[in-house]
Structure formats: C-alpha cells, structure tokens
Amino acid sequence: MRMIRTLTLIGMLSTALVGVSSPASAATAVQTCTGPTLTTQAGRATVSPGLNGFPVNPTVAAKINLTRCSPSTATGGTGTLKFTFKTLTAKTCTLITQAHAVSTSATISWQNSTSSTLTLTISFTGATRLANVNGTVASGLFAGHFVSGQYHYKPVVSPSTFTVAQACANTVAPGHTGRISIVGLILSRTKAFTIT
C-alpha cells in the first residue's frame, strides 16, 4: 500500500512539473517582424555632425522599416520604427567602433494608423558592427510588452571616396576644409524584431 501511495505521489508531482515553464519559454510574441529579408537594407541612420577623430556631440536619427509583421490583424503587417538621440558627451568614431550602450525613446507607426511608444537601450558591439535593440513598450499598442531586435550597421563616409579608417584618422573639425567623416549608418536586420 505504501508503495502504491508513493508511486501515486511521484506521478502527481511529475505531472505538475511538466506544466511549469520558465518565464522565457512562456513568453509568446504578440508581434514578430521578419522583414526586410536578412542582409538587405532595412533602414538608415543619419549622424550629424559626422564622426571622425575630432570629438563632437552628434545627433543620430534612425528610420527602420518593419515588414512581414504577424499577426497582421493587430498592426496591418508593417510599421516604421524611428528614434533620435544626441550624445551627452563629445564622441569620435568610438561611438560606433567601441562597445557601449545608449538609451532613447522611440516610436513605431503601424500601417493601420496605430502607434507604439518605446523606451529602448541600443547596445553597440563595436568591431562586429551590431546594434542590439532591447526595451519596453511604454504606451500605445502593446503597452507593457518587451521589445527586441538586432541590426548590422555599415558606416557611410563623406566624401564617399574615403574609407572608414581614413575618416576615423581625420581630425578636421566640422565646417573646415579637408574634413572626412562618417555621416550615416546603413542598417540591415540580423534577427527578427519581436514584441513579447
């Protein structure tokens, strides 16, 4: 009898444990955007004034297209992510060549005329040129949910005949002849943009 009761108890505990999952596995995406396709341009960021070896306080303004978003009934299937931030301290090329993180607010304008306001942390990896996007939806559609995504960035140099290395070695200040700088970033998606 004791053996039967013991086996019954073990069976009940096993059944209960099967139904328990970790918070990570329990998270279900309320919106997943898998477009544009990997390695194709998903958006662009402008950097003004541009980055080189002369320290400046640049403003970075990004616009990223979100496509193939599902379920499309909630958003219309596409959206546009926008954010702008200005560095608190003067930066050189290290803004994009060294690992660090910045915080900013952002908005997503969805195809069906709804919107989401986000609080984001953008973590730059440095040498691998990846930007990890994480945060929460502060208000609007999907308020209270978590946001994540990852983008590869390709620096845009002006004048275009010069390289990133030449721009970063250049120390000419903004507005002066001979200045070479990174004035933008071409962004391509490396992971799905998800809201969970």
Image (tube, helix red, strand yellow):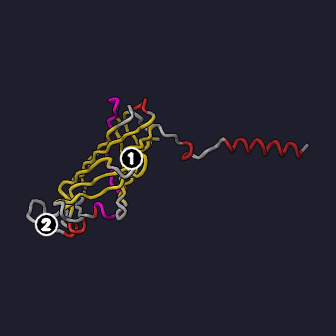
Q: Identify which residue, 122 or 72, lies in the foreground.
A: 72
Of discs 1 and 2, which sits in the foreground?
1
Q: Where's residue 58, x and y in %?
A: 21, 55
Q: Is residue 42 visible?
A: yes
Amino acid type shown at disc 1: Thr
| Dot 2: element | loop
- Counting other residues with Cα less than 10 Å from the Cα at mark 1, is it few (<14), some (14-19), or many (20 or more)? some
User: Which residues are drawn in magenta?
Assistant: 95-114
Q: Which residue is mark 1?
A: 37
Q: Identify which residue, 168 or 13, lies in the foreground.
A: 168
> Total number of numbered labels?
2
Question: Which image quarter is the N terminus in?
Answer: top right
Q: Identify which residue, 50 or 59, lies in the foreground.
A: 50
Vertical relation: 99 (above or below) 11: below
Identity of the residue drawn at 47% across and 37% down: 30
Amino acid type shown at disc 2: Val
Mark positioned earlier in the residue sequence (1 or 2):
1
Which residue extends farthest right? 1
Identity of the residue drawn at 37% across and 62% down: 128
Q: Which mark is residue 78?
A: none
Q: Is residue 56 visible?
A: no
Vertical relation: 173 (above or below) 87: below
Q: Where's residue 98, x and y in %?
A: 33, 64
- Counting other residues with Cα less than 10 Å from the Cα at mark 2, is it few (<14), some (14-19), or many (20 or more)? some
Q: Quadrant of residue 166?
A: bottom left
Q: Which mark is residue 172?
A: 2
Q: Where's residue 27, x and y in %?
A: 53, 42
Q: Is residue 97 magenta?
A: yes
Q: Is residue 98 magenta?
A: yes
Identity of the residue drawn at 16% across and 60% down: 159
Q: Where's residue 55, x and y in %?
A: 20, 64
| Dot 1: element | loop
